[in-house]
């Protein structure tokens, strides 16, 4: 078959046409919001460019002058993550080793050419114990970009699914396109235990072994193309930069100084480790050591255990730093609520504060929340589950009331909806006052939006308040329902009479459409009589 008969690649053909069109000046790319005729990809405003450059230099300076100590990192993590002392120690040491090496390489570029075993980390442990939170806060402290992804979304290159190289590209995005900063970032891959090679699987295991092979290449020292083959917009942007003759962006990023952390629950691995230890002729089991829970077993995992679990020896070898996180008990969950700076309880306080509402939680209630969350068996995530059920009705009802504080007791956890109803009954008089004020608020909005003054009589306000409580509907929703077409009729009346002030009585609230029709008819009659009187006066003259 001749060359001209060979099938063409549609993407390559499109790229060639695009290059030609841009060289000939026949194509101009407009970014959303850009002015007509503006140059695509025009340089940013000087002030913004200066701010970006300053932030970039500050971030790189922190890396070049990295001087944190492991205990300092541990103390910082104590503010956010409860327990996990061994994990904090291991992570703190690995972070210091890694970024001290990065600093030395920046000081002496010759060190880059020497072999160095990167401190990539493998964290084992159940869900909700703080694995992701730990690493996110470490990245924040060091001042480097951070990305997180689940291993299950990736597949071997060439198959349907994500490409592991996207992890590094996402890191560049997290660094606002700064490739130099991104090359010192942290990549966190969760659910790594889900890509163990399927034992006895038929055909290619494209989401297991294939992903492991691709990941291990990233974790050492490789060049990653910053433009995916499927990223048409990115390729168009690169072409436009070349056409403008500006400084070309780097086409690749090196992963030598990117720190990789992987984690997983490895729930089945604990049993495997137990069996190995218990079957050993001489081992911990025979020497009296007890494995009280899965955390103890995972703390004794060996490389061979990972290989038997379905991981490639080369992949495990790229993860020399390993640590197991422990389960959280009710006391730990209580401490998270009371002392963690990232406590979900603080989040709920901030949510209520947005409505001007505060709440107090009795110590017994906090302990009860911790016990219920522990029963969920999802670690710290169980706290959100329990607190969401607890505060659901409070967050729905109280912002529309005059209630500005409440107390959570153990009894509240058993029947939160009942406690809300009781709270509303105790504050019924204050609630009526609030609803009367909302009638006045609606009148102001109506005047602002339509230019008509609605004066609500006392009996009309009382009727609206009663109906609001009876129908469990806000005053705003009730008034918008009753008076949604009122401005049309009032406009007709104003054309004939010039009147722009109208009194709303109880009868109008009870049947607004009927009363408005009566007003319109009366207005036309009055206009007709006035017109007739004017004609009679003209005839007499």
Image (spheres, grey):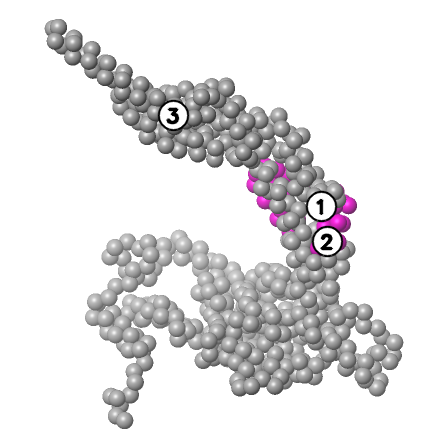
The percent coordinates of residue 119 (x first, y second) are: 63, 75
Residue 510: in sight, yes or no? yes
Q: Mark 2 points at which residue?
A: 372
Q: Name the residue under label 1.
A: 413
Task: Name the residue located 25 percent from the left edge and 63 percent from the top edge.
Answer: 28
Please, what secondary structure does the residue beneath circle 3 have?
helix
Task: Name the residue located 60 percent from the left edge and 69 percent from the top edge.
Answer: 190
- State whether residue 389 is above or below residue 400: below
- Crowd tier of the residue under label 1, counting other residues whose Cα lies within 10 Å: few below 14, some 14–19, many 20 or above: many
In the image shown, does 508 or 25 lie closer to the viewer?
508
Task: Name the residue located 55 percent from the left edge and 66 percent from the top edge.
Answer: 148
Q: How far apart are marks 2 and 1 (CA)?
A: 10 Å
The mark that comes first in sequence, 1 or 3, is 1
Q: Going by the picture, which residue comes out furthest to the top?
A: 540
**Tag 2–tag 1 contact (CB < 8 Å):** yes
SS assignment for the magenta stretch, majority: helix
Q: How far apart are marks 1 and 3 (CA)?
A: 48 Å
In the picture, measured across the screen, residue 506 lies left or right of residue 25, that is right
The mark that comes first in sequence, 2 or 1, is 2
- State whether residue 403 is above or below residue 532: below
In the rendered structure, does residue 328 fall within the stretch colored magenta?
no
Of circles 2 and 3, the one toward us is 3
Q: Mark 3 points at which residue?
A: 514
Please, what secondary structure does the residue beneath circle 1 have?
helix
Q: Give the range drawn in magenta.
A: 344-373
The percent coordinates of residue 438 (x first, y second) are: 50, 29
In the image shown, does 215 or 416 lie closer to the viewer?
416
In the picture, measured across the screen, residue 189 lies left or right of residue 169, that is right
Picture quadrant of residue 513: top left
Q: Residue 483 carries which label?
A: none
């Amino acid at each position: 078959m001749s060359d001209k008969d060979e099938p063409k690649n549609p993407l390559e053909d499109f790229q060639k046409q695009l290059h030609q069109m841009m060289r000939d000046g026949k194509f101009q790319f407009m970014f959303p919001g850009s002015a007509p005729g503006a140059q695509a990809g025009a340089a940013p405003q000087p002030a913004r460019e200066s701010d970006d450059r300053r932030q970039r230099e500050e971030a790189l300076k922190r890396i070049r002058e990295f001087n944190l100590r492991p205990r300092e990192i541990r103390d910082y993590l104590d503010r956010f993550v409860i327990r996990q002392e061994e994990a904090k120690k291991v992570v703190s040491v690995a972070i210091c080793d890694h970024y001290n090496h990065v600093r030395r390489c920046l000081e002496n570029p010759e060190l880059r050419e020497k072999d160095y075993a990167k401190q990539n980390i493998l964290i084992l442990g159940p869900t909700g114990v703080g694995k992701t939170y730990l690493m996110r806060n470490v990245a924040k402290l060091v001042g480097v970009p951070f990305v997180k992804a689940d291993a299950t979304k990736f597949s071997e290159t060439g198959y349907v699914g994500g490409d592991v190289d996207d992890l590094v590209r996402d890191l560049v995005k997290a660094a606002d396109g700064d490739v130099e900063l991104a090359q010192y970032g942290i990549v966190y891959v969760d659910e790594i235990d889900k890509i163990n090679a399927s034992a006895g699987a038929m055909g290619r295991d494209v989401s297991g072994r294939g992903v492991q092979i691709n990941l291990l290449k990233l974790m050492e020292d490789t060049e990653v193309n910053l433009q995916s083959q499927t990223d048409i917009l990115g390729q168009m942007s690169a072409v436009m930069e070349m056409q403008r003759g500006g400084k070309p962006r780097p086409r690749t990023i090196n992963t030598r100084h990117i720190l990789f952390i992987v984690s997983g629950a490895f729930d089945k691995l604990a049993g495997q480790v137990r069996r190995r230890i218990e079957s050993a002729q001489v081992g911990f089991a025979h020497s009296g050591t007890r494995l009280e829970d899965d955390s103890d077993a995972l703390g004794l995992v060996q490389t061979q255990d990972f290989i038997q679990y379905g991981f490639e020896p080369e992949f495990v070898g790229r993860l020399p730093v390993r640590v197991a996180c422990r389960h959280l008990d009710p006391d730990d969950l209580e401490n998270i609520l009371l002392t963690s700076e990232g406590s979900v309880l603080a989040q709920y306080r901030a949510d209520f504060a947005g409505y001007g509402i505060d709440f107090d939680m009795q110590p017994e209630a906090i302990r009860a929340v911790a016990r219920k969350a522990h029963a969920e068996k999802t670690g710290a995530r169980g706290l959100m589950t329990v607190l969401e059920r607890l505060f659901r009705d409070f967050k729905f009802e109280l912002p529309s009331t005059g209630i500005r504080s409440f107390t959570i007791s153990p009894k509240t956890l058993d029947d939160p909806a009942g406690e809300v109803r009781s709270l509303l009954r105790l504050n019924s008089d204050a609630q009526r006052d609030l609803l009367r004020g909302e009638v006045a608020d609606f009148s102001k909005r109506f005047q602002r939006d339509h230019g008509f003054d609605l004066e609500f009589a006392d009996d009309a306000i009382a009727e609206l308040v009663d109906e609001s409580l009876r129908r469990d509907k806000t005053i705003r929703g009730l008034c918008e329902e009753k008076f949604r077409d009122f401005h049309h009729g009032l406009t007709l009346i104003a054309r004939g009479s010039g009147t722009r002030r109208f009194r709303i009585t109880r009868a109008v609230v009870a049947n607004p459409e009927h009363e408005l029709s009566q007003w319109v008819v009366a207005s036309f009659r009055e206009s007709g009589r006035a017109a007739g009187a004017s004609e009679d006066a003209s005839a007499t003259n």
